[in-house]
Image (cartoon, grey):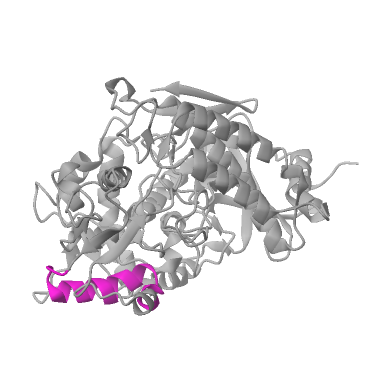
């Protein structure tokens, strides 16, 4: 008997399929609609609250051409271009071009950019940046809801609560995707001429911080590496999984963003001896690139000069401190003021204890100047980081995906047998009564990563990590789910495990220290021979790597 696609699940056909409805997905939806393309926006969450932006944000990064040296597209290119970034000057320039377009959108939907008494926007500097590029936002908790209202009004079909688990390809060409509804279990099959991946540039929940709570994270805990795993499984090449591993400082026992704001206001980081030490690690001290604050803080810890570590802001401008604590910080995480009340924190009166955060895995799809990956029709909507980088990346990627539609007129058909196999894999945990809970499975992954892939690591430890992760993988068929929420967590665990394996393999290849947030105890020195990017892909399910 021939199986029909519509007998397997709900079939949706479109020109542009956008996966992920966070800042990047919203930018992509706006870009696709502006060019009149049929577009479908899909996310396992709900558009009004999905993505990192769903929790709020207190700034949007943009160059505004007020100074050719520090506040111009050229300054942006000079800051971000690097042989190891994966960006070309043209890609960065396009980010600069998209910034004012997205600023107009945000103002249109009612985002309130804070102004100085003279009417200019209040802008602050970020880690290591040459100019005050961060435009401060007053009502950051409302951004996502207001953007969602616009996206729903411009003709984009929004599909909430559907988790995509597999990209469909034929002859190295994207043809669609498979997912399922995390609330009712219905299968979805998408046929598309182009796909924009906008699922977030991170994988969290791979380690924990001092709370031991994998959901108390610096960035969104629901990002489990799907951006990389879906692309990798579809045959796309990945880069920089060894370098783009992220961390920050966070308030003690409370993971939150906004350390750039604390540094920018003029805070001094102090070790347990009361010494301001960052001058040993970077000439810009606390305002240098985030990497150096992480490496510096960890080195002080290794030398027995902490914990505790504190950010001392008592000498800073009191109005700026009030604005930071009561407007900007809650804009990133609404419960920050509850934390302050419970801990007795007052930036103007007392130093605030901080600690190194959990480690977040990241990387990038190998991306051409038109934001297309190495798989034809698959576009990278998460080229750049932060609110601005994400929204602009999505917008540019969708623009290019629309331009590529004419070369996708005749796509290969989706094979029902492939859909049937993926459907069986997705729902297998629902049939494993008495099996292993997703929580225990995920906890095992976190324990391995925290022990062997922490701030200090070495070859032998990472080899053991791969062995242990492989052992954990052998238990995948035993993971059980008793409802659709647990099924979502079980399928997240699949991506979480795979991205941990990829990042561990990549880290083993970079036999040096000082270029990433971690130190190799067996290779503690910087090595110019590794001034290159590591590319990863798979052939027949086997991982492949090469240096660029």
Q: Residue 77: horizontal and vertical position, in percent?
A: 22, 41
Q: Residue 506: horizontal and vertical position, in percent?
A: 47, 30
Residue occupying image coordinates x 62% and y 63% = 161
**Does residue 323 show up magenta in the picture?**
yes
Is residue 282 rendered to the left or right of residue 377? left
Q: Is residue 165 above or below residue 540?
A: below
Magenta part of the protein: which range? 314-338
Residue occupying image coordinates x 19% and y 48% = 278
Q: Residue 279: horizontal and vertical position, in percent?
A: 15, 46
Residue 405 visible in image = no
Is residue 319 rendered to the left or right of residue 104? left
Looking at this view, is 367 or 533 the one in front?
533
Looking at this view, is 192 or 60 the one in front?
60
Which quarter of the rendering shows the N terminus? top right
Task: Specify the quadrant of the image occupied by residue 26.
Answer: bottom left
Looking at this view, is 441 or 153 the one in front?
441
Residue extending farthest to the top is 529
Total numbered circles: 0
**Does residue 527 show up magenta in the picture?**
no
Which quarter of the rendering shows the C terminus? top left
Residue occupying image coordinates x 13% and y 44% = 283
Is residue 376 rendered to the left or right of residue 292? right
Q: Residue 393: horizontal and vertical position, in percent?
A: 38, 49
Residue 68 visible in image = yes
Residue occupying image coordinates x 13% and y 68% = 316
Most common secondary structure along the magenta stretch: helix
Task: Specify the quadrant of the image occupied by residue 30.
Answer: bottom left
């Amino acid at each position: 008997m021939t199986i029909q696609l519509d007998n397997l699940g709900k079939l949706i056909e479109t020109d542009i399929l956008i996966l992920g409805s966070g800042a990047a997905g919203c930018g992509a939806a706006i870009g696709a609609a502006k060019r009149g393309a049929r577009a479908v926006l899909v996310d396992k969450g709900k558009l009004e609250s999905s993505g990192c932006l769903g929790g709020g944000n207190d700034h949007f990064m943009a160059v505004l051409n007020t100074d050719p040296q520090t506040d111009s597209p050229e300054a942006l290119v000079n800051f971000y271009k690097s042989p190891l970034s994966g960006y070309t000057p043209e890609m960065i320039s396009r980010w600069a071009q998209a910034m004012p377009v997205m600023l107009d959108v945000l103002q249109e939907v009612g985002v309130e950019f804070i102004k100085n008494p003279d009417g200019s926007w209040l802008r602050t500097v970020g880690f290591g940046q040459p100019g005050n590029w961060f435009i401060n936002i007053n009502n950051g908790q409302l951004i996502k809801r207001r953007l969602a209202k616009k996206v729903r009004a411009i003709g984009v079909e929004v599909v909430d609560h559907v988790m995509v688990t597999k990209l469909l390809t034929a002859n190295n060409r994207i043809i669609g995707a498979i997912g399922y509804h995390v609330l009712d279990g219905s299968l979805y099959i998408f046929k598309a001429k182009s796909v924009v991946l906008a699922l977030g540039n991170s994988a969290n929940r791979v380690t924990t911080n001092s709370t031991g709570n994998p959901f108390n994270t610096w960035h969104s805990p629901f990002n489990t590496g799907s951006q990389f795993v879906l692309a990798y499984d579809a045959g796309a090449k990945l880069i920089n999984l060894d370098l783009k591993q992220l961390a920050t400082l966070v308030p003690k026992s409370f993971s939150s963003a906004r350390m750039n704001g604390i540094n920018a206001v003029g805070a001094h980081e102090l070790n347990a001896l009361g010494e301001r030490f960052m001058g040993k690690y970077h000439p810009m001290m606390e305002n240098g690139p985030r990497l150096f604050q992480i490496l510096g803080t960890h080195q002080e810890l290794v030398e027995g000069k902490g914990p505790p570590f504190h950010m001392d802001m008592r000498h800073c401008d009191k109005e700026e401190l009030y604005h930071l604590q009561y407007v900007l910080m809650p804009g990133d995480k609404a419960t920050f003021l509850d934390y302050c009340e419970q801990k007795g924190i007052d930036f103007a009166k007392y130093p605030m204890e901080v600690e190194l955060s959990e480690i977040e895995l990241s990387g990038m799809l190998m991306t051409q100047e038109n934001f297309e990956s190495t798989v034809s029709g698959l576009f990278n909507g998460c080229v750049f980081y932060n609110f601005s980088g994400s929204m602009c990346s999505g917008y540019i990627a969708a623009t290019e995906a629309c331009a590529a539609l004419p070369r996708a007129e005749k796509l290969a058909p989706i094979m029902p047998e492939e859909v049937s196999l993926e459907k069986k894999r997705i729902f297998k945990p629902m049939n494993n009564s008495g099996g292993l809970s997703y929580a225990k499975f995920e906890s095992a992954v976190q324990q391995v990563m925290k022990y062997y892939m922490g701030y200090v690591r070495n070859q032998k430890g990472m080899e053991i990590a791969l062995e242990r992760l492989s052992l954990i993988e052998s238990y995948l068929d035993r993971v059980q789910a008793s409802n659709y929420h647990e099924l979502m967590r079980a399928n997240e665990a699949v991506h979480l495990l795979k991205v941990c394996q990829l990042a561990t393999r990549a880290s083993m290849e970079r036999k040096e220290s000082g270029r990433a947030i971690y130190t190799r105890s067996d290779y503690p020195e910087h090595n110019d021979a590794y001034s290159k990017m590591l590319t990863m892909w798979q052939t027949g399910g086997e991982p492949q790597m090469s240096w660029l």
